[in-house]
Amino acid sequence: MTGAPKISVRGLKKSFGPKVVLDGLDLDVGVGESVVVIGGSGTGKSVMVKCIIGLMEPDAGSIKIDGQEVTGLKRSEREKLMRKFGMLFQGAALFDSLRVWQNVAFGLIQGHGVGKEEARAIAIKTLGAVGLGPEVAELWPAELSGGMQKRVGLARAIAAKPEVIVFDEPTTGLDPIMGDVINDLIIKCVRDLGATAISITHDMASAHKIADRIAMIYKGKIIWQGPANTIDKSGNEYVEQFIHGRAEGPIKMEVRAL
Amino acid sequence: MAFLARVGRVVLAFFSAAGRLTIFTLTALSHCFRPPIYVNLILRQFVDIGYYSLPVVGLTAIFIGMVLALQLHTGFNRITGGESAIAQVVVLGMTRELGPVIAGLMVAGRIGAAIAAEVGTMRVTDQIDALSTLSTNPYKYLVVPRLLAGIVALPVLVLVADNIGVFGGFLVATYKFGFNPAAYLQNTADFLRSSDVISGLVKSAVFGFLISLMGCYTGYHSKGGAQGVGAATTYAVVSASVLILMFDYILSALLFSS
Ligand SMILES: Nc1ncnc2c1ncn2[C@@H]1O[C@H](COP(=O)(O)OP(=O)(O)O)[C@@H](O)[C@H]1O
Ligand SMILES: [Mg+2]
């Protein structure tokens, strides 16, 4: 990583009632870098990215985007800042009352004042970039398979050419081949846009493929991070257990006897 | 001690819920007056709330008007000369009280539930968060159109319900009890004051606001999956119905105190 980081997170804390989810988390993401955050289910990966892009207000800590502190920003400032981000949600989160092309064009029309016909043309072009033909544009989200929904979500996230793209479990729930198609699309889209990327996954094949750097979250902190090709010899027993998917190890699943 | 703690928890929960609702209401209202205003969405909600509620409101109104005349006839039979007051009491009861309340309760069931289910589903599937990431304020896009449409649609519905209810009373009085139709209508027209109708319309505008507000609020704050949305839907209908009857009393006391 060279120069000032695009995103710099320090001491991030977030609890829900008595449940501590993030407990002093630090993370830097360089300009144009692709960082993958791995970790078990329910460890707060989604909460972390929601804090970063401003969908949740953290309890404590600092988040800097391009050197600017963004916690506690006024709503109007916050809305302006959000235009730098595109996000692919865990469940795609497509608007089911709108057609596919309207989903993809949504941010262009609402946020960037692009006219309807032009936005539609851009939407169809963006759908093409994620491998969906123009015939899909007129369908409703409910008519699509899971993999297609993820691709539409991807198209929607990149349509307005954001500076930072967040992918929340992009391959979860897809078959391995479709998962790999999504991985390739992510790499291609991020490269084409020159964007900074934060991806969340617990799919190691996906992490290896799309990451410049991998960070592992456990108990609300980043416990290990390093270049993607070094994770296999991390020397960290938590990481070892996670990437090999072993039930035995320092990470204990809370399973009670029947 | 345990008992006190439990009482304390209930009291605290009540105040925090009241505070959340107040903040939600004020935020939503403040967005009603700041651009952008989505005119298309307001019109679509108006059609949903107003036009598509016409059958159910009309049907209930005619039966209420009919049963009112029936009951009054039985009751007034016990008073000498009381019978002649049926036309007056029917029109007064419909415009001031039954029109607004019946329409309010029917729409609370129909629209309050639909709003809560739609907004709640959008919440639990991250669609509301997705709106924010696409430069769209969810209050402006989801809440404001429903509030404004509710405030305008309910008075229109009540105007229709008033007429149909009075007509129901007219049918029973003339066909069943042999009142002179012309005299009945003359009695009705002579007795009715514009303040009777207007007070009913004012009430119904408040009811429309309450229905949309509770639908949006419970949906917006719903948690979990399908179960959370179900709970939000129930809560929206029950709270809107109770609030309608509460505000009916309060507004009646205020409007008719002079
Ligand atoms: N809005 C919320 N309210 C309460 N608890 C939440 C909320 N969002 C997340 N959590 C809790 O935070 C924890 C981490 O959630 P999440 O970040 O979604 O996990 P994951 O790492 O699988 O993405 C979970 O235990 C979840 O129950
Ligand atoms: Mg998650």
Image (spheres, rainbow, N blue to C red):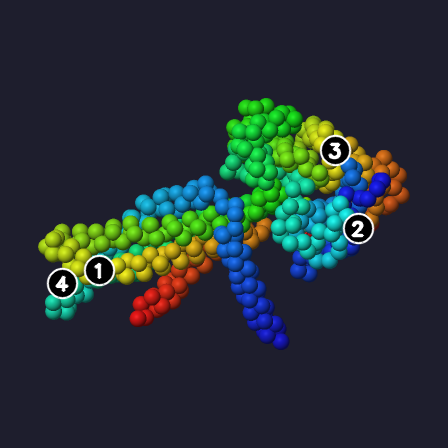
- Residue annotated with mark 2: A26
Name the amino acid type tagged 3.
Answer: Gly
Dots 4 and 2 on the same chain: no
User: Mark 4, chain letter?
Assistant: B
Residue at position x 78%, y 32% in the image: A209
Q: Chain of mark 1?
A: B
Q: CA distance from mark 4 to mark 2?
A: 82 Å
Residue type at mark 1: give it. Leu
Mark toward the start of the polypeptide (4 vs 1) = 4
Residue that carries the numbered disc 4 in the rendered image:
B84
Mark 2 to mark 3 CA distance (whole Å): 24 Å
Amino acid type of the residue that numbered disc 4 sits on in the rendered structure:
Ser
Identify the residue at horizontal 53%, vertical 38% (top origin): A96
Q: Where in the figure is residue B247, as x and y percent of width and height?
A: 39, 63
Mark 4, ligand 1, within 8 Å: the answer is no
**Chain letter of disc 3 in the image:** A
Callout 2: chain: A
